[in-house]
Image (tube, rainbow, N blue to C red):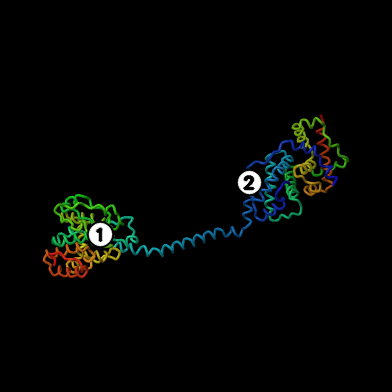
Amino acid sequence: MGSGPADEELMLAYGGGDAGAFEALYRRHRGPLYRFLLRQVNDAATAEELFQDVWMRVIDFRERYQPRARFTSWVYAIAHNRLMDHYRASGRAKFLAQDESEAVLDHLPSSDLPAEALLDRKRTAERLLAALARLPEPQREAFLLQQEGELSLEEIGAATGVSRETAKSRLRYALAKLREELSKP
Amino acid sequence: MNDEREYRDHALSRVYREGAWPEPGRQIDQAILTASRRAARARHPMLWRWAPSLAVAATVVLTSTLVLKVYREQPEVAAPVTAEKSTAAQRAKQPAPPEAKPAEVKPETPPPAPVTTPQGFSSNMDAGEAERLDRAKRDLGLKEPPPAGAPAQAAAKPAPKAPPALKKEEPARADAPSAPAPGAPVSVFGAAPPAPQAAPQQAVRVGKPTTPFTQGTTAAAAQPRPEAAESATQFQAAPPPPEAMKPAPAANSMYSRSTIGGASLDKAAERSPQSWLEDIRKLIKEGKSEEAGAQIAEFKKRYPDYALPEDLR
């Protein structure tokens, strides 16, 4: 996460009344967290609302924060919970029981992308984002947690409230589908 | 773990990062950061709870300290002001100059008596006394009185409002003597050696007020003016002026009738021998032989080696 004090130290400092520590923490994580939410809801206004809520919760929890896990895991867990609330409120909660076809996918497809996909990178990126938007929420979330939050499988499981194996399965599905989409001519 | 590497597709990650990188708006940033600062301040609720009370207490302490200080200093300032007021009531109703602070004026206040000239008392003195006063004034280094023919001009001139007597030294004015009138007695001490130390200082102090008072009093003689008349009355009645306005003892004796007519030997002794002798001659002319004799004796005592002129032996 770059140089400087660790996220956990900053959060503890902020809990001790150091507003500057929070600012450093915020600058470090604002982009990835926002994109994580935006890719999930596909609406900037909703994403900003959720984003603000997540940070407000961080602020509220400043004095109770205990660095038992990485700060990133903790903050993305908050974001996940906020997303669940949002899904429930918007009637999209059914996805929670939707991802159990993962067991079908035993092997990851080859990680090699077609040469054409790598040539036109901008267009490929747009296709990837479009494919990401079509993924089921849990798989998309697992992929985004890995890409934006740089969480490990363990942390993805912890943040989303599932086992490591479930997290692994979701991620595997996400990667397979994305590669498949990009491999299409 | 192998799992981690297996499930991290770098090619896919690279493609993903080449897409758009949206970020939250500045307003959201500001809102969140403001909330975080506010929360951080609330970290010390005790301090913030007591801050207003502490501020009020500090203000009260500061204010009361200032008030006490002002009260303590006030009597020191007020006393001379009161003295000044009573003096002003007794003396001419001339407003004090704004810059004349009592505390500063006190040590350098010129004596009131020397600021007048014999012309101002012409109605109450004979010519000899007036002349003697003039001479005594010159002996002290005061400037020439205005010419005898000046009263008309002086009457035409507006009297200065602020009495310069209360002002500090102004050498420019002191160095600007008025030309003697043809009929006025010529000072025989014009070329006399400088008087002893005190005289020049007094001359500088009193030099300035001389002119206005002279003008005022001479004008009063020709054309009665309430201010000048009152001023003259003040000097004649000679009420004891307050400490701040009291003239120096030496100057007072010089202008006091009793000392002039009696034994102002101490003062005379401070004069140059020539001027003293001139005074003695005047006394003889006026028929005051006893006084003249006493002064000659005193002169001999003071200047035993001085050869008395023929007419005074």
Three-letter code, disc 2: Ala
Quarter location, residue B218: bottom left
Q: Is residue A99 left or right of residue B205?
A: right
Crowd class of label 2 (few under 14; some 14 to 19; many from 20; radius 10 Å) = few
What residue is disc 1 on? B194
What element does badge 2 sit on? Answer: helix
Three-letter code, disc 1: Pro
Residue under mark 2: which chain is it in? B
Mark whose residue sits in front, 2 or 1? 1
- Front residue of this view, candidates A84 and A12: A12
What element does badge 1 sit on? Answer: loop
The lab-note entry on whether marks 2 and 1 share a chain reads yes
Crowd class of label 1 (few under 14; some 14 to 19; many from 20; radius 10 Å) = some
Q: Earlier in the sequence, mark 2 or mark 1?
A: 2
The answer for how far apart the CA atoms under marks 2 and 1 are is 87 Å
Q: Is residue A26 left or right of residue B219?
A: right
Quarter that holds the C terminus of chain B: bottom left
